[in-house]
Image: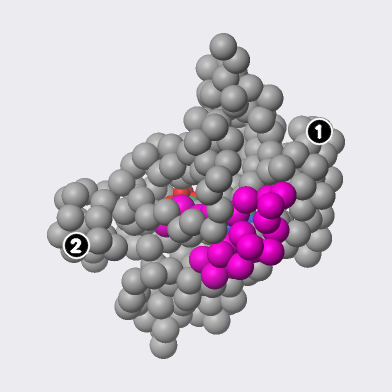
Amino acid sequence: MTSPWAGLKLVVTGGGSGIGAAVVTRAAGLGADVLAVGRRAGRLAEVAAKARAVGAGTVVPYAVDVTALGAATRIAERAGEVLGGVDALVNNAGHAVFDRLEDAAEADLREMIDTNLVAPALLIRALLPLLRARQGCVVNVSSVGGVLAMPNRSFYGASKAALNSLTRSLAVELAPEVRVNAVLPGPVDTGLWDVAAGEDADTLRENIVAGTPLGRFGLAPEVAAWVCHLVDPETSSWVTGSLVSVDGGRTA
Ligand SMILES: NC(=O)c1ccc[n+]([C@@H]2O[C@H](COP(=O)([O-])OP(=O)(O)OC[C@H]3O[C@@H](n4cnc5c(N)ncnc54)[C@H](OP(=O)(O)O)[C@@H]3O)[C@@H](O)[C@H]2O)c1
């Protein structure tokens, strides 16, 4: 029997590392063709080479800053050219700063809103004609930070809360042609935590684990599996507007 993933076309932002790379690898492994977007061309090329070695779907790297003026249009044009259509957009690229509001740089606060909210919205808009043409879907990679209090990361939490709101509103606005869902990861062991590296990093990690009922950080492939579950037309064609927590129990 043919896999429902064979021939699916995905655009994945932040596809060169962490959760995004795990989504690209899983989707391509299942047979999908993927446009993998990110700023670091080298990281995207590594992910594409890994997928090539597995030998199912094709991964095409596209090095672009999703917050750059006109980026959404360029990504949509590139997706049309190299994929010939889009079944799913995974808005995964994210910017996170660990700082008290009074200490955070204004540029970082603006970059979080640009990367975590404005870029996903513009990308959904730019890809809509392609998504509508194939009854496609969007999966936004949000965060439990969008539903929990996030001291010392308040603006990050606010940007993800806004992404959650965008997800639910667009799910209704774009139905029935395009489904829109979000995955809300808890703490996942990726490079995102490198920004917290330093003398407090060990304490931070210990506190995170202590506050997580399942007692550990999540792994990128564990989150990628849920992203792909929401893309999968066989499992999720009647699911839209859902905010799915994958968080080791942090929001229980
Ligand atoms: N790790 C966690 O604990 C956790 C928890 C909840 C939610 N999340 C969310 O999960 C998503 C992925 O994060 P991660 O944990 O996998 O960390 P990560 O490895 O640092 O991934 C972030 C990705 O976003 C890309 N990116 C950032 N700014 C970009 C821009 N302006 N243009 C294009 N790409 C950009 C980065 O690639 P380049 O630097 O190459 O551009 C990178 O691949 C983020 O939205 C994050 O907020 C993570």
- Residue in view at x 68 percent, y 25 percent: 7
Q: Nearer the viewer, residue 192 or 113?
A: 113
**Residue 16 against residue 126 in the figure, above or below:** above
Q: Residue furthest top?
A: 1
> Is residue 239 inside the magenta stretch?
no
Residue 251 x/y as whole percent: 29, 63
Q: Earlier in the sequence, mark 1 or mark 2?
A: 1
**Residue 106 against residue 34 in the figure, above or below:** below
The image quadrant that residue 118 belongs to is bottom right
**Residues rendered magenta in the picture:** 163-184
Total labels drawn = 2
Q: Between marks 1 and 2, how big is the CA–CA gap?
A: 45 Å
**Residue 120 against residue 24 in the figure, above or below:** below
Q: Is residue 207 left or right of residue 50?
A: left
Residue 204 x/y as whole percent: 23, 63
**Is any part of residue 65 visible from this angle?**
no
